[in-house]
Amino acid sequence: MGDPVTEYTARLQHQEREIQSLSAEIESLKKSQSFEPSQRLEDLREENNRLKYRLNVMKRSLQEETPHCGKSMLNINQRLQDVFGEAIRASFPDLDNPPLAVTPNQQAKFGDYQCNSAMGMAQMLKAKGTKVNPREIAEKIVQNLPDNELIQTTEIAGPGFINIHLKKTFVSKLLTSMLLNGVQPPPLATRKRVIVDFSSPNIAKEMHVGHLRSTIIGDSMCRLFEFLGYDVLSVGRLNHVGDWGTQFGMLIAHLQDKFPDYLTVSPPIGDLQMFYKESKKRFDEDEEFKKRAYQCVVRLQSKEPDFIKAWNMICDVSRREFQKVYDCLDIKIVERGESFYQNRMTQVVKEFEDKGLVELDEGRKIVFVPGQSIPLTIVKSDGGYTYDTSDLAALRQRLFEEKADIVIYVVDSGQGTHFQVIFAAGQMIGWYDPQVTRVEHAGFGVVLGEDKKKFKTRSGDTVRLMDLLEEGLKRSMDKLKEKERDKVLTPEELVKAQRAVAFGCIKYADLSHNRINDYVFSFDKMLDDRGNTAAYLLYAFTRIRSIARLANLDEASLRKAAETTEILLDHDKEWKLGKCILRFPEILQKILDDLLLHTLCDYLYELATTFTEFYDSCYCVEKDRQTGEVNKINMWRMLLCEATASIMAKCFDILGLNPVQRM
């Protein structure tokens, strides 16, 4: 069974089109003096009236079951779009896809939200030969607004802006619902399956600062999808590591020479980066070594046991090093190397050949994709596979075996053209329809040093990620001691605060920048406790949490208060804070659409500063000046404090930050 409201609306629209058609026919007949009443028209009008009546009854019933009665948080912007969309359709039923623009108002004096559709609709009507003033359009939209639970008043301003004032009782009930039910995601129409491909270091090479952005951004995207209720599969957090190919031939050959007893005694490879550099030097300078390395690749790909064992040893050393980074950053990820797709690559090549999509070019097998200037090389002239082959095999496996509805690749922007061709090839061969399945490259810029050049050490080497994280820990502890937090925190609390600040600041500095752009890495800026930084937000959060402790209110007391206390929003700072808290669902929807996580950071900073304005203007707890005893608690304002902290905590969770109760 479909949604009855949608079903009746569709039937109603069909009937109205038929009525318009018959009316036009009657007008034509009138002009030719041969008009006779149409029974079909009368029947349609009668059926139409019945449908309108039933539709209005159902809509009123749905409005009575207001969304704030459920556990999910309501997206106010989306609800307003529904209301204004209905009014626009009723006002101008002949307009196809009229613009629907509802946004939060930036200035409180103009109301809470604004509908800006009238100007765009005037342009559409003008293009159809009808000139209408946008203000007249706005007036007609307002006249056709359906009964609803959230709009107090509207007013038309300027050329046709419709300013919207929300009902304070409605906002108050939504806040109470959130406090009683917790911060719940908006309702999800369908629970889609998601895979996010991120981090992706190469085996036998240490993770460096270039892997930082992919790891942090990808993890946060997974957290967002998980919170919203999507099925981020058991392999949804995918680490597509480079663990196959020529470099392993040279590593195995070097292993055989340096540790000839590696099959019986585990080789003490402490510095894998140095081991890689040694083997690469030999590979570049020694032709005999190079030949043996290529032979090792063949024997590895033939899965000879001794070579598989050597390969596993090297992979295990890398994994231990990677895990140190993932443990610091609290990253949960499933490794799936290129080797996993080896057999599937053969199937992919065969599938493209069977469909006549493969061309031969100097011994290579290539695929040209319509609209793309660069072909894919799926088999090299020596018979080996390429990154193109493995990425096609990975895409196919994720779509057909994992049955993913959404596949996101968090890889640097330099790979944009490559993924564009891979995705186009997947569509060309019929693996997926982009209207149904979302396959997307979430690219990002590079990390720059404070000199605005690519971030490197003084010697010019790429910065090791573990070195950067350890430097963050050192600077974080220095900052805490500078603020004399070591004198008020226990040693255990101090270490927790150190890690929260260090790793939180590194993550937030990345996520707070638009991922598409390059960003400058600066410990001094990210550890600053002023402005839009993790340090400021973490301190702000602990201060908000401390207000309840000051008032001697525990979780049970606050819950009881939420059940019995109406949240008044009479002061303009209370009203501003209440609305800001409830914008959380619409912020999440925007990020879901464009995968730009800096929007959440901007919102988090706005929420913290809006709370500060509220706290400076509205007392929550009053203390006796002589004794220091609490003598008055404003409970509805305490509930606003709790609601703010709850939303901040959920934002931190999505961003992968770990706030502590005391700092």
Image: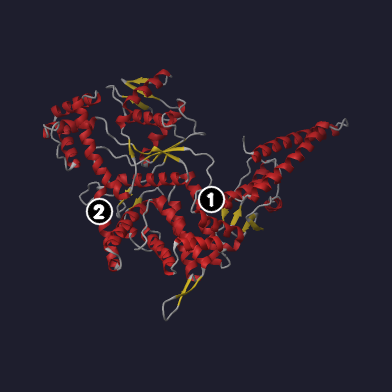
Q: Is residue 610 visible?
A: no
Q: Nearer the viewer, mark 1 or mark 2?
A: 1
* Residue 520 x, y percent position in the rendering: 33, 53
Secondary structure beneath label 2: helix
Q: Residue at x 52, y 63 (%)?
A: 561
Q: Residue 205, located in which quarter of the rendered image?
A: top left
The quadrant of the rendering that contains the C terminus is bottom left
Q: Residue 92, located in which quarter of the rendered image?
A: top right
The quadrant of the rendering that contains the N terminus is top right
Q: Is residue 594 left or right of residue 64?
A: left
Of 160 and 611, which appears nearest the observer?
Answer: 611
Q: Is residue 82 above or below residue 31?
A: below
- The circle drawn on residue 470 is 2
Residue that sits furthest to the right in the current view: 33
Q: Which residue is mark 1?
A: 71
Q: Is residue 639 above or below residue 382?
A: below
* Residue 584 x, y percent position in the rendering: 50, 53
Q: Residue at x 32, y 47 (%)?
A: 212
Secondary structure beneath label 1: loop
Q: Residue at x 27, y 43 (%)?
A: 322
- Few, some or many C-alpha atoms within 10 Å of disc 1 (few <14, some 14-19, many ≥20)? some
Q: Is residue 291 left or right of residue 116?
A: left
- Name which residue type carries label 1: Lys
- Name which residue type carries label 2: Glu
